[in-house]
Amino acid sequence: MESALATEILVNTTGKETRIALLENSILQELHVDRGSDRGTVGNVYLGKVVRVLPGMQAAFVEIGLERAAFLYVGDIFSPALEHKHDDDDDAVEEDPDLTVIEEQPAREVARPGQPLIQDLLTEGQEIVVQVAKDPIGTKGARVTTHITLPGRYLVFMPTVDHVGISRRIDRDKERRRLREFVDKNRPKGAGFIVRTICATQTNQTLKQDMNYLLAVWDKIQEAQKNRKAPAPLHLDHGLVLRTVRDAFHDDVDRMVVDTARVYEEVSSFMDEFSPSLKDKLHLYKGAEPIFDAFDVETQIARSTSRRVWLKSGGYLVIDQTEALVSVDVNSGKYVGNTSLEDTTLKINMEAVKEIVYQLRLRNIGGIIIIDFIDMDREQNRDKVYRAMEEECKKDRARTNVLKISELGLVQMTRKRVQEDLVRYLSESCMYCEGRGNLKSRQTLAFEIFRECQREAHKSPGKETLYVNTHPAVADVLYGEEFDTLELWEQKLGRRIVVRALQHLHPERYEVYAR
């Protein structure tokens, strides 16, 4: 087992699959997976074609060359006549981007005051430059915006926003003033930058180099727009590994360990240009066992995809994901406590708070989340759990909004969803239950078959035999515990019923026909 460090980034490459694990004190905090053919599109810039305008939804479908058309809300359309300068209240500025996603420009699902109608801004067949803000999720196409953001190592360039923003994590006033003055002096007119946390203490020369690099990228995008016909890509963001180096490999990371020589060389060359001072923290893993086994990551991944998650006290969580929302149920399980029921309940709920927020982050769960804590009688205990939930969510780089515990003992919250969650990405719907999580019981199917025999006998007078093709498990019930019922139906219908077990049939599928 490798020795543990405070913060580590592990990169595992297996064929076309690349996995990146972010560890804190040997505990898996984030897992990101790229399988080449379905790599993420967030951050990519496309020349798209408007294929449909929806006035009723104040949105439009834009063809950008992906499997499904992208979705563009009216509030995500840049309109020079409406674009306004921000004031210096940096509460409007997001924290640094997370491991793979730039979030400085929040997606707007509703129009801003005075925003023109979608039908006044776009027409079908129009070409438009857009950037992917959310990857396709489930049956939904990508979410796009015309507010382009180009991330560098130290800065984020916003060619459509006249604003300079400073990360809130840079808390020294003198440093904030220095950075703001330098960026404001050197930025193009009408464009803006966000200064990332890593900029603190960086020299003006370093910032200028990053600024020039981003401006060059924007020039290439504009030049590509002139020479291409929609739909077409104008700028593809770095792959998962290099995005991780750019966005997450900072001074507070103890080391980055890569298990493939090719990827190691790629990262090394990238760091020569963008972060040479950190190269001594980059290591090539040469162990015999898989890197995720050596760092005990595989077992943690397996736990992150389980429906039931055990707590140290003996309680457990049940996490269920549906199309509309995610529900988390907190249960006492094996924990019985040693004082009172209220104290026992409070302890389990407080322990559950940390695990819930951890699981949401690790699984990359977003959207609407409903948490059913164990009921507590005391108002002060409910407030304590709610405050703990708020504090834990502050550690999450994705935007969250937590409501107080309701009268039904439920916590309602939202978490920004940008990518497919981990469980859905690593799994697929069950071929038997089709994602429902359950199947009809064999007894239920047996009685359905008897009723279907009645229908078939009515439709086929004069036929002597009814044939039933069904899964072997159901056939066992018909010829076993329900054999008496089968004989009764033969007498009632005046027909012979022949049951045939076919292994290839879906457990819920059966066929009944007469001959």
Image (cartoon, rainbow, N blue to C red):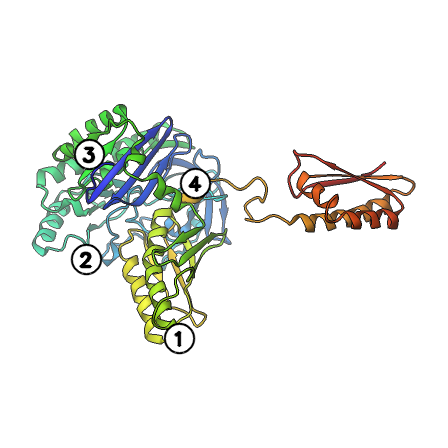
Q: CA distance from mark 4 to mark 2?
A: 40 Å
Q: Quadrant of residue 262?
A: top left
Q: Earlier in the sequence, mark 1 or mark 3?
A: 3
Is residue 279 positioned above or below 315 on the image? above
Q: Nearer the viewer, mark 1 or mark 3?
A: 1
Residue 187, percent from left and from top: 17, 43
Q: For numbered disc 2, what is the local secondary structure?
A: loop
Residue 70, percent from left and from top: 44, 41
Residue underneath mark 2:
88
Q: Earlier in the sequence, mark 1 or mark 4?
A: 1
Residue 371, visible in the rendered structure = no
Rate crowding at label 3 as few (under 14), some (14 to 19) or many (20 or more) other CA atoms within 10 Å: some
Q: CA distance from mark 1 to mark 2?
A: 45 Å
Q: Quadrant of residue 459?
A: top right
- Split into 4 quadrants, where in the image is the N terminus? top left
Q: Residue at x 45, y 70 (%)?
A: 408
Q: Nearer the viewer, mark 1 or mark 4?
A: 1
Residue underneath mark 3:
213
Q: Quadrant of residue 424?
A: top left
Residue underneath mark 1:
377
- Identity of the amino acid at label 1? Asp
Q: Earlier in the sequence, mark 4 or mark 2?
A: 2
